[in-house]
Image: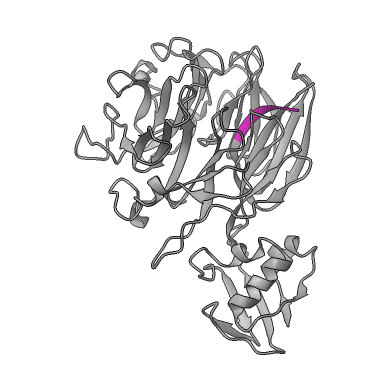
């Protein structure tokens, strides 16, 4: 019987919360990689046994650890993501994002890094190569961030998504830079930002330079949503234009945040975690009252879902990888906070329970059914 | 020759802080070290062959700036890694 596991990557290691399918009793395993930062830990839905973790210890070089026995043992990638050697070439500072490849390509994974780079593995994370169609553009493409444009922790390539209908169709998010897509397995890339606001750019119809926070492609329908620095959006595939579905959020809450989660079966259902994006951008729950907002109609309307969450004076942040859904019915939702809490809902967001306290700052939360 | 490693790298060497490796340059020594303890080199040296910013390598108590630095039999190599960050 597969067990439900929630992989919690933190600033000081990886923790695994496990439960049976009833989700009543939980136990914690870990820490793995104690003291090392885990930016993302992801299970392979194609085999239910392979786990990859993006790990970096302090000032040492970045790497990827992999487990082929559902987390019982871990080994390091023989060749972690690294740029080609070149005069004045860049070095990967950290691996930020991990995405399993298409179901038709077992063993394929993608990794996004800071500085912005895209890497692929065809042996379940043991060895990694740069995706030349992206990485070769780094020297010349104006939409790939340079050092001086970088956010405090460095410019990142994140939100790698594979179109469920076409394994050659890839999406990535660049912070900053925007959303880009490839229809030829990464050989060439085009911006996909029309209709998306970039309040910090002078051109309201800028082709690139945007700041997607989290892009999600529905695993069945291929519908595309993003939580952006400037709102919540749904892509109109026919016109390749983003529609700001965050306009339907309560005005006093706004539509700024980091994570965005899709229902695994219903492409019209999604959840976000709004943050205060006013003045200097505190990035905390609006008014200190944390709430998930959910939509059942592809963002035309939203419902506040805060039962069980702290009613006031809660000032944590939920990072872009730190919210996810399981594949059970009803869908379980999970998010981790920068103050080391993990919260869960087993009724699709209607009510919330704290699964654990006192972890290090949570970087990522991914739920999976493991063999 | 004798190589002394910092605690953040001890997971590669079964917690041994002093190990043996051979080479006529720091680069060769690190390659030998990586053969014995796979993955350890990339934690210290990036893909452009630069010593990572907060890693220092000393040969006989003198800091070296490049992996091209020569080594002689009997040299002692000390690797130091910063622990800043909280």
Asked if A234 appears above or below B73 in the picture, the reply is: above
- Residue B7 seen from this side: no
Span of residues in magenta: A365-371
Q: Quadrant of residue B14?
A: bottom right
Q: Quadrant of residue B13?
A: bottom right
How far across and how far down the image is residue A320, in percent? 50, 35
Q: Is residue A369 magenta?
A: yes
For residue A183, side relative to residue A2 (left or right): left
How far across and how far down the image is residue A65, in percent? 66, 48
Q: Quadrant of the C terminus of chain A?
A: top right
Residue nearer the viewer, A286 or A141: A141
For residue A199, side relative to residue A150 (left or right): left
How was this image coloured? one colour
Residue nearer the viewer, A284 or B81: B81
- Residue A359 seen from this side: yes
**Residue at the extreme left of the image, as rendered:** A203
Q: Residue at x 74, y 36 (%)?
A: A70
């Amino acid at each position: 019987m597969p067990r439900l596991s929630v992989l919690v990557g933190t600033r000081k290691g990886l923790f695994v919360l496990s439960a049976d399918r009833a989700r009543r009793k939980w136990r914690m395993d870990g820490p793995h990689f104690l003291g090392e930062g885990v930016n993302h830990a992801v299970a392979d839905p194609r085999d239910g046994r392979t786990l990859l973790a993006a790990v970096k210890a302090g000032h040492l070089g970045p790497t990827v650890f992999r487990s082929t026995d559902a987390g019982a043992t871990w080994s390091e990638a023989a060749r972690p993501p690294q740029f080609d050697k070149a005069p004045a070439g860049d070095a990967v500072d950290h691996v930020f994002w991990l995405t399993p490849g298409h179901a038709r390509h077992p063993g394929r994974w993608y990794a996004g890094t800071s500085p912005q780079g895209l890497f692929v593995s065809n042996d379940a994370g043991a060895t990694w190569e740069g995706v030349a169609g992206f990485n070769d553009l780094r020297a010349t493409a104006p939409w790939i961030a340079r050092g001086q444009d970088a956010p405090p922790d460095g410019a990142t390539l994140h939100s790698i998504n594979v179109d469920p209908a076409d394994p050659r169709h890839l999406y990535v998010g660049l912070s900053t830079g925007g959303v880009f897509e490839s229809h030829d397995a990464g050989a060439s890339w085009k911006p996909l930002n029309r209709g998306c606001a970039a309040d910090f750019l002078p051109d309201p119809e800028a082709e690139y330079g945007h700041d997607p926070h989290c892009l999600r492609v529905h695993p069945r329908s291929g519908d595309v949503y993003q939580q952006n620095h400037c709102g919540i959006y749904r892509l109109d595939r026919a016109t390749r234009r983003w529609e700001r579905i965050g306009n339907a959020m309560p005005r006093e809450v706004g539509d700024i945040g980091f994570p965005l989660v899709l229902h695994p079966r219903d492409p019209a259902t999604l959840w976000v975690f709004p943050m205060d994006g006013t003045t200097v951008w505190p990035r905390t729950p609006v008014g200190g009252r944390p709430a998930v907002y959910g939509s059942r109609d592809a963002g035309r309307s939203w419902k506040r879902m805060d039962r069980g969450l702290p009613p006031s004076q809660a000032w944590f942040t939920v990072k872009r990888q730190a919210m996810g859904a399981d594949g059970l019915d009803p869908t379980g939702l999970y998010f981790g906070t920068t103050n080391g809490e993990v919260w869960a809902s087993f009724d699709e967001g209607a009510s919330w329970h704290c699964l654990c306290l006192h972890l290090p700052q949570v970087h990522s939360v991914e739920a999976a059914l493991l063999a | 020759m004798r190589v002394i490693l910092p605690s953040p790298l001890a997971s590669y060497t079964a917690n041994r802080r002093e190990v043996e490796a051979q080479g006529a340059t720091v680069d060769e020594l690190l390659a030998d070290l990586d053969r014995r303890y796979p993955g350890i080199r990339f934690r210290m040296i990036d893909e452009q062959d630069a010593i990572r910013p907060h890693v220092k390598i000393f040969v006989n108590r003198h800091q070296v700036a490049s992996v091209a630095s020569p080594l002689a039999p009997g040299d002692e190599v000390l690797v130091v890694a910063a622990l800043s960050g909280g």
